[in-house]
Image (spheres, helix red, strand yellow):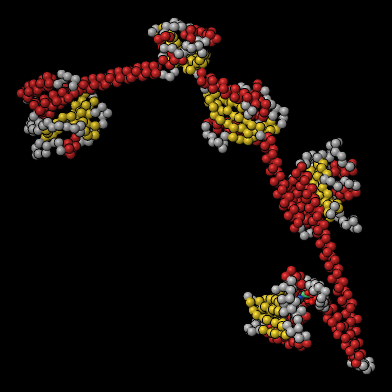
Amino acid sequence: MSERAKERFVEILYELTLAVGTTLDLDHEVNAFMDWLAQSIRPRFASLFLVDDAHQFLHLVAVHPHMPLQGERLPMGVDPWTWLRKQGIQAEEQDGVQQYAVPISAEGQVLGIVCLVSSASPETIEDERTVVEAGAGYFAPVLRNIWRYRTLEQQVAERTKALAQSEAMFRALVEQAVVGVYLIQDDQFVYVNQAAADIVGRTPEELIHRNPLDFVHPDDRALVAQMLRRRQRGEIDAAHYTFRVLHRDGHAVHVEVYGKGIEYQGKRAILGVLLDISKRVQAEEAYRALVEHSLQGLIIIQDDRIVFANPAFLRATGLTGAEVVDRPLEEVLTIVHPEDRDAVCALSQQVLSGDISPATSTIKFRYRRADGQMRWGRALGGRILYRGKPAVQVALLDITRQEEARQQLERYTRFLELGNTIVHNITHATEIHTLLSTTLELLMEHLEVNMGAVWVLGHPEQPSTVYRVLRGDIAEDDPRVHEIVQQFRHIPNVLDRPMVIADVLDPQQTLPPVLQEGLSALGIRAALAVPLFARAQRVGGLALAVREARAWTREEVILVEEIGTEMGMAVERLRLIADLEEALRAKDEMIQNVSHELRTPLTMILGYTELLQEGILGDLNDDQREALSIVHRNAGRLRFMIDRLLLLQMLDERTLERSWFSPTAWLEEVYKRWLPEYQQHNVNLVLHVHDPLPNIYGDRHLLDEVMDNLLHNAQKFSPQGGTVRVRAWVEKEELYIAVSDEGVGIPPDKLDRIFDRFYQVSQGLSRRFDGMGIGLALCREIVELHGGRIWAESEGEGKGSTFYVALPL
Ligand code: ADP
């Protein structure tokens, strides 16, 4: 720098010291600095950026040549030149134009930046830069001071504002508080707010400088005086208690105070908060009265302790007040049945946490009363405020009677269902042994009994026939069991009624000694035995037994007794059926035997009559011949019937001798065979077989027997001149053959029965048809052996009948 330039430099800087740093006004100082820059350097363009407090942005605060700015700023780190160009703020670049930036920094902190487009020549540009740098160096502390001052000013303003606000707030709070606030010093009120004065029905002014004790209820004065004294002396710092004050009109008001010792104007004072709790006290008193007389047990639980229990609760549990009140909840919970304890605990927890719905707020549980009795209770939990703190109130209702009734009903229903199942079983049994064993097993399972026996005595004529079923924990062949069953049989009247033994060893038990010994020997402690009756006759017994004493319930006894009766009847029924079947078998056997026996002599009769008829034993006159032919014909009919009887007895699957044959040809042959007989009785016989019929596979000889029987009957029951039609057709894989007549017809209720052996529809006395009632039985037997069906249809008596045979193809 030349001497001239140095002089100019000092001059310019001197001008700057005159221009800036004269005020604490930022705008003024910025403008002064920019004016100085413009006049002393004469740049083409200059801009001044200042860093913000947060050091995040550079704010453009001034531009030369002057232009209005609207708070433009650029983030720190962005090149100001590029940014200026984008804003359209900087003049266009020109050749040979120099631009540079100079930071403004103080105490190592950058406060801003000056960007310049110089008009200096390349020779003087360095000098110019030195001037700008020096200027910036001078301007920096000025800026710094302004900022410092500003921050300080701001802080002061904020503090003042906050202070004013909190003071106002405090005053408003105290003045308008719904709680009473007071200050006591030297046994006098020095401050009382409106709410505190209201409690005693006065104005704050009336209370100031008065002794607080003047307003306390005489009975509580000693207490309050003591509390005040202790705080005055600094023995205690704060006190929280309740007492009564006197209202101006004479009544007592319950208050709660919270008083704290403080320093006030250099002296000890008590700042207190006063609360009118008369409503709460009243509510509590009302609640207490209600609860004391409530029939529902009530307890209040707070902080896991029972803090209150009403007389009804003590009555319900049989506990004394001392055993409940002020005891931990856990301890009192020991009366609850262990299985229900968790549920009860959970209820109290849920109520406390508020996580409860009407569905979960009540539970059923068992508890032990002090006298040892188990009772059922229902607990209803609710959240209440007790002495100003949240608590759980539990109401207890003794629901033992309802619960017992409900259980009884359930038991009844169960027994009813069980009874139904067993009776169903019994009525559907087809065999005595299964009947006895399944019933016994069902009973034992449902009554949870581990030993059971059922026995049925033989017929009086065969006393040794005994059905016996033993189940469970007992050996079938144990001779002692047999002995007991025998005892039941032989001791007179022993099982005329149910025998209920709760405990074999009970001396009160009126059990025949033999039985008692027998049962004890088997290790049986309790038993229930009922007779099986059939038609007022004892036919056996049913017994259930267990190895421990057991009080059989009324329902159990009734159920077992009922089952015994049902079983007795079922046994009788099955026996009757068995007897009937036996009788039928015997009858069949006899018929077969008789038929056999008859056949030989009949053959002899037929043989000799034929010899006689042929004249081999000598000539016969006409009368003799006539008589012989009658003998021969009837002997023939007799043999025919005997043969059919024998056939019916011996028919079974194996007797079928099947072959393939054409039904059309067969029916035509049958028709031809029967036509003369029909003509003889003046009955028309018609055969209709239109469609070509497929061959069938059957025993032609036996099927002939079927057609013979049907045609014989049709003719027999037809009036003279009547018509019998035989039709045949195919329908759904079956060959149908129908034989219709115009005869006497069959009553609808007899349509099925006529196929039974030896069954004949009664025709009254007017007319009598011969026959034995086995023809249709034989037909059915044969058709069914072929896998087919046979049935009859009739419009009723006198309207003819149609017999259908359907044979599978
Ligand atoms: P029966 O040897 O008595 O004819 P069936 O077994 O052939 O024996 O017939 C049994 C009974 O069915 C007859 O006694 C009769 O009452 C009745 N019955 C059979 N066929 C006819 C018919 N076509 N019309 C009326 N009743 C009939």
Q: Residue at x 26, y 29 (%)?
A: 55
Q: Where residue 266 sits: x, y (%)? A: 39, 7
Looking at the image, which residue sits at the far right? 618
Picture quadrant of residue 13: top left
Picture quadrant of residue 97: top left
Q: Where residue 472 sits: x, y (%)? A: 78, 49
Q: Where residue 313 sits: x, y (%)? A: 64, 27
Q: Residue at x 80, y 50 (%)?
A: 564
Residue 97 located left or right of residue 680: left
Q: Residue at x 40, y 17 (%)?
A: 174
Looking at the image, which residue sits at the far bottom? 619
Residue 73 located left or right of residue 259: left
Q: Is residue 528 above or below residue 183?
A: below
State the quadrant of the C terminus: bottom right
Picture quadrant of residue 630: bottom right
Pick the residue in front: 335 or 430.
430
Pick the residue in front: 247 or 80.
247
Q: Is residue 610 visible to us here?
A: no
Q: Is residue 507 above or below residue 499?
A: above
